[in-house]
Structure formats: C-alpha cells, structure tokens
C-alpha cells in the first residue's frame, strides 16, 4: 500500500502527460498503460555470439532511459529482455551461435554463456540497469512448441517435412507495423526454403534440424529448433501476458522480426499484442550502419579502453534515440569534455556541501524552472539531448553561484545536489556511482591509474631513464596490461 501511495505522489510532480512516438501508429501519443500505475515492457535482447558494439550500446542505453524515467514517474515497471542463444540465422541459413562455436571449436552453449556474461559486463559498465527477467530462448522451448501448436490449430501455420511455417496470407494485418505490403516483402527469402513455402513471405516457426545441427529438440514435427521471431512472442507473452504495454528494439528489427512477432502473436490469441512499439535508430560510421557483418564496428570493450564507460553513455544520450548517431573518436572526445563539465560541477556541489553552513544569500539558484524544463524534455518522447541541454544551463547557473563572493548556503546547495542526483543520476544515469554515494572520487580509478603510469613512463623515456620505463612496461604486463607505442602515443589493452 505504502508504495502505491508514493507512486501517486511522484506523478503529481509531473503535471504534463508523457508523450511517446508509437511506431505502430507513426505518431506521438500520450502514454496510457493497460493497468494504471504498472508497465509491462519487452525489448529484444542480444544474440550472444560476439562482444557487444557501440550499436548495441545505443539500443540498450535508450531503453534503459525509458525504464528509468517510467520508474522515476512512479510506474511499477516489469522489464523483460531476452537472450537469443538459438535460432537467429545468418543470410546463409547458419545459426549465428552455432557458426561461432564451430569456429572456436567449443560447444554452442559455451559461446552463449561467454557472450551473455560479456554483454552484462558491458551493460553494467555503461550503467544500464539489468532487466527484471532475462529469459533465454533455449530455456523456453516448451512455450515455443506450444505456440506453434496453437498456430497450427488456428490454421495460421502449416507443416512441411518437419518444419512449420507461418502462413502470412492468413493474417490480414501483416505489414501494419512496417507499412509494407505482402507484395514488397519477398526480399531475404533464403534459398533452400523457397520450395517448402506456400508464399515467399512465409517464415519458419520451427525448423527441421539437419543431421549435423547440434542445437536440436524433440517436437511433434521431429527434431528441430525454433525460429528467431517465435522466441520473442513466446517469451514476452509468457512473462507479460498476451497483451502488454511496450515492445522495443532496434529499427533494423522492425521488419521482418517485429512484423512477424505481431502476426504470430495476434493470430494465436486474437488480441492486440502490443500497445506501443518503440524503435531506436542505429549507430553509423561515416553515414554507414555499424554492424558486425559490415566489419565497421567498435566493441564497447575497445571504446572503454580509451573512454570512461559513462562518457560512452553520455555520448549516446546526446542524440535522440530515434536519430542516428554517427560514431567517431572526435565525437567521443567532445562528449568527454561535456560530461566532465557536468560531473565536475556536481562534484563541486558535493564538496562544498561538506563545509557549508546555513546562510542565506541574496541571490539564489531556483532549481524549479530547470526541473520543469527537464521534465518537459523527457515527457516529449524521452528527448535526452534537450534534457542534457537543460542540465548544462543548470551547471552554468550553479558555477556562477559557486564562484560568487557570497557563497551559497546549505539549503541552496542541497537543492542543487538533489537536482543533479535526480536527473543526471537517477534518470540519465551519467554520474559515477561513487559520486552518487557521496564520495568525490571518479568511478573509473583503474583507467585513470593506467593512464598515469603511461604518462610517467613517457616522462622517464624523455629523461632517458630506460630501465625505469622498461620496469613500468614489464610490471604492467605481469598484471595483464599490454602497452603499445604508436605514432599518436601509447595505447594499452588487456592481454587476452
Ligand atoms: Zn525479438
């Protein structure tokens, strides 16, 4: 009861309605969940066969902001984000996880485990809150088989040679999310399955496993494995019900993945599947999509060697989630100096609070207009670049006060600290946790210390103290940190 009460209080602090862009209706709409005060949200999780890159970072940071903001407004959010460890096929028809396991000569589940851990490690670093439930596709084979059976019974699917396909002609709304008609959706049809399908747009719900396919499960149609689209429908409905509030994912998943999810879910239940579809735009490199297949990707782990993970997060939030984000080292460097300004001011306020007394100055910062403008930005489809601009304005106002002759008093500093903590901390998640806990030191001490040693070594070499510079290099190597001297300076990486 207590919790419900506090939720109501919070929401009165946000007098404006939350408006979000719904990809399904292609317009901005006021957010109204199915059940007052609670939100069910599902986001397509990673396919775990490689380390996450900046593109994944943009997607999961974007949805993290949505979850954080909904919770800040007082909603009780159940956030489900799956792990795809089977069924996500390449154009060649090979399973991504299985292909990687062949290359590395290990069991496919070892690949899934390794990269699931790597994914959460990176997400923890960029301060993405973990989902409440992270279901794995291989752990939900029964639910998927049940869904296929249901679709067969309803006449929306058909079986051919141990594979089951969804009959797209049976669902009149096919194409409603992407705006494509059945006629212009033949692309991507794989050679080898064309002969089995009634229509080229039909997609596999269940695939017959060839003899050498290790990932296989018994089913009423013989040994096989589930299709990628099927798993998201089965797992989202398992935890959130047959109709739920928000489904998110990358823009590249809108078609065919999400279109197919809608078709099979709505055919099976006869109910609307999702109220609000939210899609994040992609990360580009020189205008081209960053992707594993194009080979132009930068992993988050690589980026963290040069930049604090929170700088990467800040960089992502400087563009709107529905806008593309062009990646370059220069853009990250610019983000770093912006982030440092914010962070330094928030830290200065904390430091000042340690010695402040309760005096009242004639001039005072009034946080209220900043608070209102920040909420206004976030209420407008989670406009983080606008919200960050408000924080910069606030930072300027705070710095003016900190540098004034009449120092700010305790209550003024506390109000400023609360605004930073609520908005830069709780909502945007760009303040280091140590600062949040009241300490003034930076969160990424180890990165700063390695850089310090690199600087000391450079100085030692300048002074021709080569024994010392070698010692620094060797001692770092003994703890797994490898230095590489390049034209632009010394870089470091963790030994594999
Ligand atoms: Zn999905």
Image (cartoon, helix red, strand yellow):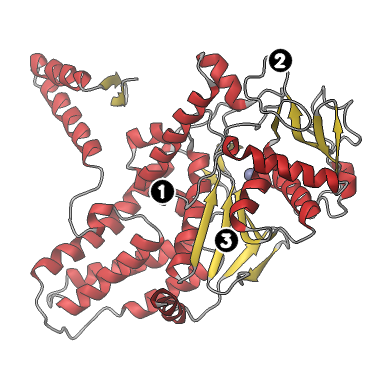
For residue 162, which numbered disc appears in the image? none
Q: In the image, is residue 473 above or below residue 81?
A: above
**Residue 169 in the image, given as x and y percentages of width and height:** 90, 46
Measured as percent of width and height from the top left, residue 203 is found at 79, 37
Instruction: Name the residue nearer the viewer: 17 or 5.
Output: 5
165 left or right of 216 in image = right
Q: Is residue 428 left or right of residue 40?
A: left
Q: Nearer the viewer, mark 3 or mark 2?
A: 2
Binning the other alpha carbons within 10 Å of mark 1 as few (below 14), some (14 to 19) or many (20 upward) gives many
In this picture, residue 62 sits left or right of residue 433: right
Q: Earlier in the sequence, mark 1 or mark 3?
A: 3
N-terminal of the pair, mark 1 or mark 2, is 2
Q: Which residue shows up at 61% across the image and 31% down it?
A: 86
The quarter in which the N terminus is drawn is bottom left
Q: Secondary structure at mark 2?
A: loop
- Quote the CA–CA distance across marks 3 and 2: 40 Å
């Amino acid at each position: 009861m207590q919790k419900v009460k506090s939720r109501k209080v919070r929401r009165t602090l946000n007098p404006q309605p939350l408006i979000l862009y719904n990809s399904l209706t292609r317009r901005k709409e006021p957010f109204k969940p199915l059940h007052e005060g609670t939100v069910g949200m599902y986001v397509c999780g990673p396919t775990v066969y490689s380390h996450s890159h900046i593109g994944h970072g943009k997607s999961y940071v974007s949805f993290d902001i949505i979850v954080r903001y909904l919770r800040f407004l007082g909603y009780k959010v159940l956030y489900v984000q799956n792990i795809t460890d089977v069924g996500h096929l390449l154009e060649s028809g090979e399973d991504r996880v299985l292909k990687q396991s062949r290359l590395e000569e290990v069991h496919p589940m070892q690949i899934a485990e390794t990269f699931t851990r790597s994914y959460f490690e990176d997400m923890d670093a960029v301060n993405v809150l973990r989902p409440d439930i992270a279901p794995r596709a291989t752990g939900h084979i029964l639910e998927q088989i049940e869904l296929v059976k249901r679709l067969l019974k309803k006449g929306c699917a058909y079986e051919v040679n141990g594979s089951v396909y969804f009959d797209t002609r049976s669902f009149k709304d096919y194409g409603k999310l992407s705006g494509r008609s059945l006629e212009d959706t033949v692309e991507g049809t794989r050679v080898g399955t064309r002969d089995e399908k009634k229509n080229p747009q039909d997609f596999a719900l269940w695939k017959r496993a060839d003899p050498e396919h290790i990932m296989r499960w018994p089913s009423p149609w013989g040994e096989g494995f589930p299709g990628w689209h099927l798993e998201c429908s089965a797992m989202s409905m398992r935890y959130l019900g047959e109709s739920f509030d928000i489904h998110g994912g990358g823009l590249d998943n809108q078609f065919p993945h999400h279109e197919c999810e809608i078709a099979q879910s709505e055919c099976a239940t006869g109910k609307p599947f999702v109220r609000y579809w939210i899609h994040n735009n992609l990360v580009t490199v020189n205008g081209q999509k960053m992707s594993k297949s194009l080979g132009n990707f930068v992993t988050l782990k690589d980026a963290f060697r040069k930049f604090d993970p929170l700088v990467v997060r800040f960089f992502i939030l400087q563009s709107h989630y529905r806008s593309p984000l062009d990646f370059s080292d220069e853009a990250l460097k610019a983000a770093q100096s912006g982030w440092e300004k914010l962070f330094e001011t928030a830290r200065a306020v904390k430091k000042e609070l340690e010695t402040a007394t309760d005096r009242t100055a004639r001039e005072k910062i009034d946080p209220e207009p900043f608070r209102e403008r920040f909420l206004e930005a976030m209420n407008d489809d989670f406009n983080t670049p606008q919200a960050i601009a408000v924080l910069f304005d606030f930072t300027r106002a705070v710095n003016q006060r900190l540098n004034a002759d009449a120092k700010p008093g305790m209550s003024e500093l506390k109000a400023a600290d609360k605004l930073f903590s609520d908005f830069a901390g709780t909502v945007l998640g760009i303040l280091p946790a140590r600062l949040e806990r009241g300490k003034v030191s930076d969160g990424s001490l180890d990165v700063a210390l390695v850089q310090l040693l690199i600087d000391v070594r450079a100085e030692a070499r300048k002074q021709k103290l080569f024994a010392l510079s070698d010692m620094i290099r060797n001692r770092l190597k003994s703890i797994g940190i490898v230095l590489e001297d390049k034209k632009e300076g010394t870089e470091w990486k963790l030994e594999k």
